[in-house]
């Protein structure tokens, strides 16, 4: 249920209404926009007298929300959320360029890539230290050592770092990581979602390879209901009948998620396609679709990469793509 307040409402009277609603055992999410304040009621609202609340002279209207996701629902929060990562903003017209290797391999590698992508306009550095691999025999990442190498690259470049967490037990290792990524395989790891919901860090939540948009939003709800509203949604491709690309990039997810939710939506064309030569086309298409950012895999020697070299751009290829993205955004 949402309660839309009238303009220029006395703050004390609004607080009295909020206290009364909380006294009924409800959670109250306050979204204060430039012209309107919306109270989102979370919990069992079946016993709430809508007519009584609507009759208050400080209330514009009262509506029931039928969707099961509440905190991330645009009806609860009409204006776009802007997620801050240090000095970087994502959403609300702010575009994020996240780039870096699939896996951190050596100090020289991650520092060189970080310097290259920053020079091309990236404002966040991605790098995997813990790698969920389909085969147990594939490179699993440098783990804690990889995180330390990412911190060195951050010190060298000033770029905030994004890295995937796979296990609750590893959470202490991520204390100094700027953005925690929940990968596609863990999108419905609800215990992990609750735990990162107790942190005060931005969470980059990737859509599962066989999950619906509603399921993605419900996973975001787990994080936000636990207290952390700093969530960035990521479309990274879903599994379909296509046999020429790694996944199928669902670009319709971008405008649909923006319609349903106030959270920023970024796109990962690298994992979606699995083919470096078509990543730029899909990145530009995602930008045109209204994405709030891109996350691109970049490696200085893709042929010898320990993970996902086939989908990684070289630094000069990323530089060319970043320039095209800037020009496209100017047109848009």
Image (tube, helix red, strand yellow):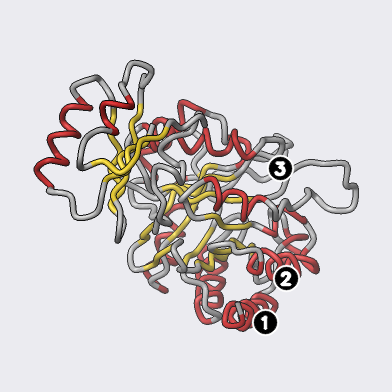
Check the picture and name the quadrant holding the N terminus. top left
Name the residue carrying label 2. Answer: 280
Q: Marks 3 and 2, how far apart in space?
A: 27 Å
Q: Residue at (21%, 26%) from the top-left corner? A: 22
Q: Secondary structure at mark 1?
A: helix
Name the residue carrying label 3. Answer: 138
Check the picture and name the quadrant holding the C terminus. bottom right
Dot 3 surroundings within 10 Å: few (below 14), some, or many (20 or more)? Answer: few
Q: Position of residue 312 (x, y in %)?
A: 70, 64
Classify residue 330 by image quadrant: bottom right
Between circles 3 and 2, the one closer to the viewer is 2
Q: Marks 3 and 1, how far apart in space?
A: 31 Å
Classify residue 285 by image quadrant: bottom right
Q: Marks 2 and 1, how far apart in space?
A: 9 Å
Q: Position of residue 93 (x, y in %)?
A: 47, 68
Between circles 3 and 1, the one closer to the viewer is 1
Dot 2 surroundings within 10 Å: few (below 14), some, or many (20 or more)? Answer: many
Q: Residue at (45%, 52%) from the top-left corner? A: 147
Name the residue carrying label 1. Answer: 320
């Amino acid at each position: 249920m949402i309660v839309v307040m009238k303009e220029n409402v006395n703050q004390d009277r609004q607080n009295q209404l909020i206290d009364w609603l909380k006294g009924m055992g409800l959670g109250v999410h306050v979204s204060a926009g430039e012209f309107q304040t919306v109270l989102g009621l979370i919990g069992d609202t079946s016993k709430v007298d809508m007519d009584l609340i609507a009759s208050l002279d400080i209330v514009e209207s009262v509506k029931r929300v039928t969707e099961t996701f509440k905190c991330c629902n645009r009806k609860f929060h009409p204006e776009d959320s802007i997620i801050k990562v240090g000095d970087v903003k994502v959403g609300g017209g702010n575009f994020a360029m996240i780039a870096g290797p699939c896996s951190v391999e050596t100090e020289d590698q991650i520092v060189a890539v970080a310097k290259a992508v920053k020079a091309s306009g990236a404002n966040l550095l991605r790098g995997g230290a813990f790698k969920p691999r389909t085969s147990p025999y594939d490179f699993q990442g440098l783990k804690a050592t990889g995180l330390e190498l990412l911190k060195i690259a951050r010190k060298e470049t000033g770029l905030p770092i994004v890295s995937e967490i796979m296990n609750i037990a590893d959470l202490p290792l991520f204390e100094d990581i700027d953005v925690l990524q929940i990968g596609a395989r863990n999108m419905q790891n609800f215990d992990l979602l609750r735990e990162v919901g107790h942190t005060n860090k931005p969470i980059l939540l990737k859509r599962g390879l066989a999950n619906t948009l509603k399921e993605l939003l419900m996973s975001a709800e787990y994080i936000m209901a636990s207290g952390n509203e700093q969530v960035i949604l990521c479309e990274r491709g879903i599994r379909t009948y296509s046999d020429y690309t790694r996944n199928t990039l669902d670009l319709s997810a971008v405008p649909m998620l923006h319609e349903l939710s106030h959270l920023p939506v970024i796109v990962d064309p690298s994992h979606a396609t699995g083919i470096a030569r078509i990543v730029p086309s899909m990145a530009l298409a995602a930008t045109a679709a209204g994405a709030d950012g891109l996350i691109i895999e970049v490696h200085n020697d893709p042929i010898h990469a320990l993970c996902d070299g086939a989908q990684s751009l070289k630094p000069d290829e990323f530089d060319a793509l970043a320039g095209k993205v800037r020009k496209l955004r100017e047109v848009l």
